[in-house]
Amino acid sequence: MTEKIRLGIIGANSNFGWAPEAHLPAVAASDEFELTAVCTTKQESAEESAQRYGARLAFHDYHDMLKHPDIDAVAVVLRVPSHLEPTRDAIQAGKAVFTEWPLGRTTAEAVELAALAKSRGVVTAVGLQSRMNPALMYMRDLIADGYIGDVTSCRVSLIREGVLARPARRTWQRDVTLGANTLTIPGGHAIDSLVSVAGGFASVSAIVSTQINQWLESDTNNLVEVTSPDNVIVAGRLQNGAVASAHVASVPFAGSGYHLAVYGRDGTLCIATADTPQRDVVQLLGAKGANAFTALEVPDHYVFVSETTPAGSPYYIGQLYSQFAKSVRGDRGDYPDFETAVELHRLLDAVRQASDSGAVTVVSGAS
């Protein structure tokens, strides 16, 4: 395959959501993908998105898009409860598929999709794009190459504001059973960033808590009950023997942003940003055999996107798309796929179990 990979995006509304914030501008700037088709629930909005982003085809039924011979790959950019069926159908149609994180509403859904993709030989990607931040990739390789020596401990925190009120179209996330909450989305991304650089968890203790049990619908002025957690605290031991901690929270006001630090026998590496590493520019700092940090310049070979890719969310999604394209073309890229997603789903299950039981929990699949 020498020409651009022909992509169809399911959930491509151009006015709101993750597609116009990240996927659509990333694909528009891509050297590897052509935005061939868009699909939304209404033909009018699909045609509007197609016109705005230059897609040749517009659909209101994703089944029709999957049947079209001009589609090589599909991105599923929908609310979490709606990931299962279109992802399953895309795999069965033989399309390479990129599904947003979380892969499924439950671990069982994620396992089903990963197993189906493997059985069909379908190339997959999952939207854990913090792994594609060049600074985090460089941090991972520095640790692997011994820059800080043996890892002894590490921590990550992500504290964001805004839990008290949100528009009605977003209050569905209040229901913990729907799979989109502080534990699964910001928690999943933040904990995954730690795992990606320092290694997987072997066991965890945890508190998963709902501190704010009502939200105000800002556009209806109604109060709605909340069962989704807004604070997640994890302490555990990594498979390499290091101790680790994570605190992820949605707080009413003035969150303190993202911080990741990994401490070793020979030095320390850390990253911080006011937002998250999948949305914002981060700076990598290192201290090797000393107590003073210096800024570390990230080598250019960790950058995969074109110069025209917009900064922020499109940049990191674009990084992932670029590596996904390598696998679609038959040359395995360095990026998270459905198997990665299953591992993270199982880790978050262990966090829930540890919180519910009050006991240290072994992470499924940990060696």
Image: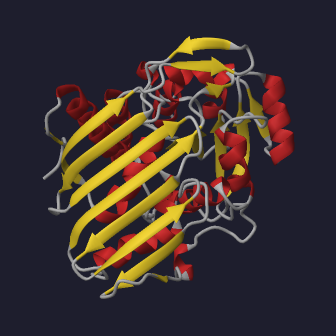
**Residue drawn 29% across and 52% down?**
245
Say whether residue 22 is left or right of residue 130. right
Task: Say left or right for 75 vs 359.
Answer: right
Q: Quadrant of residue 120?
A: top left
Quadrant of image for the N terminus: bottom right
Q: Where is residue 3, by image quadrant? A: bottom right
Tell me which residue sits at (52%, 74%) in the image: 302
Taking the image as drawn, is residue 122 in sight? no
| Residue 358 left/right relative to 31 | left
Q: Is residue 80 left or right of residue 198?
A: right
Residue 40 image offset from top left, x and y in percent? 71, 28
Work out whether residue 349 or residue 318 is closer to the camera in this orientation and state it: 349
- Indicate the quadrant where residue 172 lies: top right
Q: Nearer the viewer, residue 47 or 207?
A: 207
Observer-nearest of 60 and 329: 60
**At 64% from the left edge and 60% from the top edge, which residue is drawn?**
315
**Who's the residue at 25% across and 74% down the image?**
264
When the figure is inspected, residue 248 is found, relative to residue 134, above or below; the finding is above
- Provide residue 144's location: percent of width, then percent of height: 29, 75
